[in-house]
Amino acid sequence: MHLEAAIVDFRAYLRSLMSLYHLNGLSQYYIHPLLEGGQDLESTVTDWIRGSSDRPMAIIAGYGMGKSSFASRLAFLSAEEYLAGAPTRIPIMIPLAEIASEQGLEGLLGKRQVTTYTNAARHRWPSRSQEPSAGVAEAGRHPAYR
């Protein structure tokens, strides 16, 4: 068992990412974006994620060019791999519009988890034995932790 799975069970969150990808219709109309040189963006980013580079990567494009759709697709693929048992990173989708007012990492992650589990995906927090760290829960101000 992976260490992170022993600490926090992300399976419900990952399944919700996968469901949203289908529910939003993205699985039906997604178009693979290409870089200026004609390279496939998905392959380029996937290679970067699996590689050992410590250099950051930024995806810069104009409004409506598919950045959010690409992020959803990448999260879907990563969630699918992780749930199939592949040793891969756990995708955490954080839309910037939802976190614009947050400054700290705990607030960013906590706010996203509360939004995901209480509103969008309508999931419950894991049981007390599987709850996220107190700092994340407290930062998210989830009613169960007040």
Image: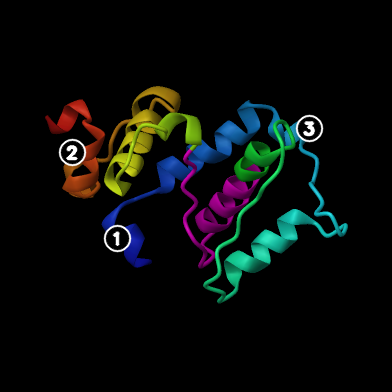
Residue at 21% across / 31% down in the picture? Answer: 141
**Which range is magenta?**
73-94
Q: Position of residue 145 (x, y in %)?
A: 15, 33
Q: Residues within 10 Å of mark 2 (few under 14, many from 20)?
A: some
Q: Residues within 10 Å of mark 3 (few under 14, many from 20)?
A: few
First-in-chain label (2 vs 1): 1
First-in-chain label (1 vs 3): 1
* Residue position for label 1: 6
Observer-side mark, 1 or 3, equals 3
22 vs 89: above or below: above
Q: Position of residue 89 (x, y in %)?
A: 49, 61
Residue at 80% across / 40% down in the picture? Answer: 31
Disc 2 residue type (three-letter)? Glu
The alpha-carbon separation of the residues under discs 2 and 3 comes to 39 Å
* Residue position for label 2: 138
Residue 116 as seen in the image, left or right of residue 8: right
